[in-house]
Each structure stands twice: as structure tokens, then as C-alpha cells.
Amino acid sequence: MAGDLFRRNRPFHQLDGFYTEWSEHLTRRCLPLFRDVPPSAANNGAVFNDLISYYDTIDHYANRDTIFYFLFPSWHVNSLETSILFLGDIHPQLFISLVQSLRDPNRNHRDLAAWKELAFPVNHFIDDVKNDISNTVSRLLREMAEAQEGFMHGFSDNWVSSSRSSQRGRQSVTVMETAASVTLGEEFVRIFREANQLRRNTIVNIVNLSDANQAALFLEGVCEFLAGFRHQVRSSL
């Protein structure tokens, strides 16, 4: 369904284009599939596979040269968005919050009726998943802080070395050049990929325990979240 969207041979300067194509794909190809009544298991499966492929693809392109682009992508320009983000993408807790909102007994819209009768014990499930997310997020944030501390030590060491060199007549270097000289990128890559794995696992757990109607509502919400970032940026231009 995605054509060559998830191809693995994009040069770095085209990665921003990947996010644009992904948003357009969600809007034009994925979201219209949820207009079917009743929801189709085949359509759910196609969208689910695209979501997993999306995270697999950005994992593939994440390396020591690109990792800071993924952790701080250029399209996250709205400070209001940061509250729902975690290490470069949607916070996995938002997926659980979506399920809880869909099940809110005060929402009586007929389209949400599917979530009134669940295929799994939702309270126990949500508690387990929330605990797993909370523990993993806390660990990754701690590891990110440690990696950042190491990066800053490497940066300051290289900066001092380059400053002394410039005093001896050599050309001074910029902050970006000094940052690029620090060889600690692999730790950031590992943490970013673990965060994506947590996002994937949360989506998989929810979809696997949902029937076709529930999965359609959940997947539609996730697609709308992901598509919304690009569209918000465009509307502000």
C-alpha cells in the first residue's frame, strides 16, 4: 500500500521529505480506509503494517550522523507539541490515553460504541501497560541524561583542544563542527531505537487485544496524531 515510501536508500538530505510523504500517505491512503462500515480487518492490517514499517524505517536511517535529526526533527516547531512527544516521536503513553478516551462512558457517539464491550479486561491491561511504559520511559530518560553528560564532556574536551589550536594560528572551529567530532552517537541511536520499540510494542498490544471495530478506531486516532504534525507546520507557513 505504501509503494516505495519505506525504501531504505534515501540520502540524508531527503529525510525531511520522508516525513512529508509519510504525512501525505496517512492522509490520502490510510485515513480514508476507516470510512468503510463495518471496518475491514484487511484495511486495519494494512494500516497497522504501515505504522510498524514507519518505525522500522526511521530505525534504519538512525545512525551517529543522523540521530540528532531524528531526536529533534525540524518539523517539531510548535512548543505545544512537546508535551506529547518522547525522544523524537509520539509519547507511547498517548496510545494508552487514546484507549481510555475512546472508552469514556460520557462519550455517547455511536462510532465509539465498539469500545463499550471490550475483548480484554481493560483496567488490568491498562495498568500493566502503563507500568511498563513508565518504567521504560524512566530508564531511557536516565540513560539519555547519562549519554548527554558524556557527550558534553567530549564536546568540552574537543572544544578546548580546538581553541588551543586556533591560538596557535589554526582556523577556529564552530560549535557544530565540534559537536560532530564527538564520537558518542551510537548510544543515542540505541536509546532512540528502544523508544521506537516501546511505541511499536504498545501499538501491537492494543491492536492484538482489540476486535476489528476497536482496532479501527484506535488506528485511525494514531494516524491522525502522526499526520497532524506535518499539517500543523504547513498551516503556519
Image: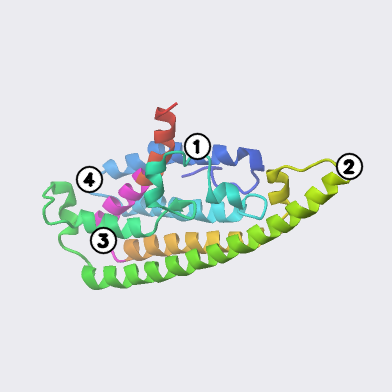
For residue 120, above or below residue 44: below
User: In the rendered structure, which amino acid carries the disc numbered 4?
Assistant: Val
Q: Residue at x 69, y 55 (%)?
A: 155
> Mark 3, mark 4: which one is toward the viewer?
3
Q: Earlier in the sequence, mark 3 or mark 4?
A: 4
Residue at mark 1 to residue at mark 2: CA–CA distance? 45 Å
Residue at mark 4 to residue at mark 1: CA–CA distance? 29 Å
| Image side of residue 212 versus residue 10, left or right | left
User: In the rendered structure, which amino acid carries the disc numbered 1?
Assistant: Thr
| Image side of residue 61 versus residue 130, left or right | right
User: In the rendered structure, which amino acid carries the disc numbered 2?
Assistant: Gly
- Residue beneath label 3, please? 211
The span picked out in magenta is 209-224
The x, y position of residue 127, in whole percent, is 28, 71
- Density class for disc 1 (Cα within 10 Å; few <14, some 14-19, many ≥20) is some
For residue 28, above or below residue 152: above
Residue at mark 3 to residue at mark 4: CA–CA distance? 14 Å
The question of residue 80 being in magenta is answered with: no
- Residue beneath label 1, please? 20
* Proximity of marks 2 and 4: CB atoms separated by less than 8 Å: no
> Mark 4, mark 1: which one is toward the viewer?
1
User: In the rendered structure, which amino acid carries the disc numbered 3?
Assistant: Asp
Q: Is residue 121 visible?
A: no
Q: Check disc 1 and report its element: helix, strand or loop.
A: helix
Residue at mark 2 to residue at mark 4: CA–CA distance? 73 Å
Q: Check disc 4 and report its element: helix, strand or loop.
A: loop
